[in-house]
Image (tube, grey):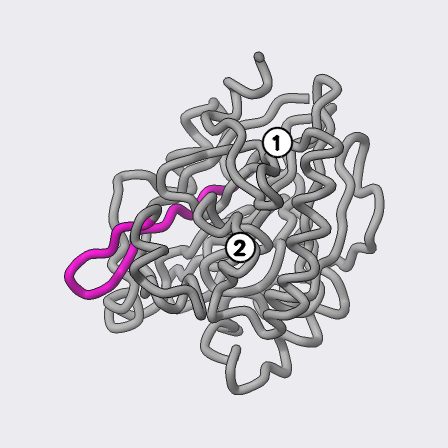
Amino acid sequence: MKLYPINTGFFKLDGGAMFGVVPKSLWKKTNPPDSNNMCSWAMRCLLIEIDQKLILIDTGIGNKQSEKFFSYFYLHGDDTLVKSIEQYGFTVSDITDVILTHLHFDHCGGAVIQSENEYKLLFPNANYWTNKKHWEWANKPNQREKASFLKENFLPIQEKNKLFFLEEGCFYKGIDLKFFYGHTQAQIIPFVTIKNKTIVFCADLLPSTGHIPLPYVMGYDVNPLITLQEKEKFLTEAIEKKYILFLEHDYYNECCSIQKINNKFSIKEKGKLNEFLNS
């Protein structure tokens, strides 16, 4: 098995929205905002090479929405999904499976492209995976979450007969999946075992190192009290089992490990994925 971080670019979101009830005077220490109160965030995906498979986790925001839509998010950086995959010697046609942790636009938007007024799949040979609970949730969104579910990002997958549902448990050798319910209904969190170490693709369970303290819960989460419970259980387990946390949205850090001092969770180590795997 080999793991490849896939950088798809950066975007900005309101700092207050990203940290919920936590005052700016606190969260700005880890995520300094610009003059509009916006903070930069990564859209970092993960590519897994195992046997004859190339499994991609999440796809970033894509580029098919309107100029007005993207003006809200200040896309920046030189990385793209395709460029990042190609830098490792692969093409979009080589991808065999795409696991979408959830169907918010910044996690699944890159899966579908627009070409000559037609929606096409960026990865034509891949099977795309979600779970039934989350699929139903995304297709009948509540008013609070509706703006995050853009149907042009995922309905074409079903229309092309490339949509498949998965369950909790083993997805493939060394890749196990668990569902979490605080951020959105049945978010998929992959646990990848390599070199006797466990890499957890944290998605929006833990977007960044700035979200490690328990009260630091995103305003976007539909069930923040459930997030609080899930985070505490997960971070406790991360210490016990020495998980390496792969951070999808952290602008500064690719990975980290966790410790608990004076009854508070904090960063133990931070760095690149390869640094953790080779240590």
Q: Who's the residue at 51% across and 39% down the image?
A: 92
Mark 1 highlights which residue? 244
Q: Who's the residue at 26% across and 61% down the image?
A: 38
Residue type at the position of mark 1: Ile
Separation of marks 1 and 2 at Cα, in angstroms: 31 Å
Q: Is residue 208 above or below residue 226?
A: above
Quick one: label 1 or label 2, which is nearer the N terminus?
2
Along the viewing direction, whichever of 53 and 145 lies nearer the viewer: 145
Q: Quadrant of residue 57?
A: top right
Mark 2 highlights which residue? 121
Which dot, 1 or 2, sits closer to the camera?
A: 1
In the image, residue 170 lies at what x, y percent? 83, 42
Q: Quadrant of residue 113?
A: bottom left
In the image, residue 36 lies at what x, y percent? 19, 65
Along the viewing direction, whichever of 228 and 264 lies nearer the viewer: 264
The magenta stretch is: 31-45
- Tell me, for residue 102, which label it has, or none: none
Within 10 Å of disc 1 (Cα), the crowding (few <14, some 14-19, many 20+) is many
Q: Can residue 226 be spotted in the picture?
A: yes
Q: Can residue 162 be spotted in the picture?
A: no
In the image, residue 29 lies at what x, y percent? 31, 48
Q: Who's the residue at 36% across and 50% down the image?
A: 41
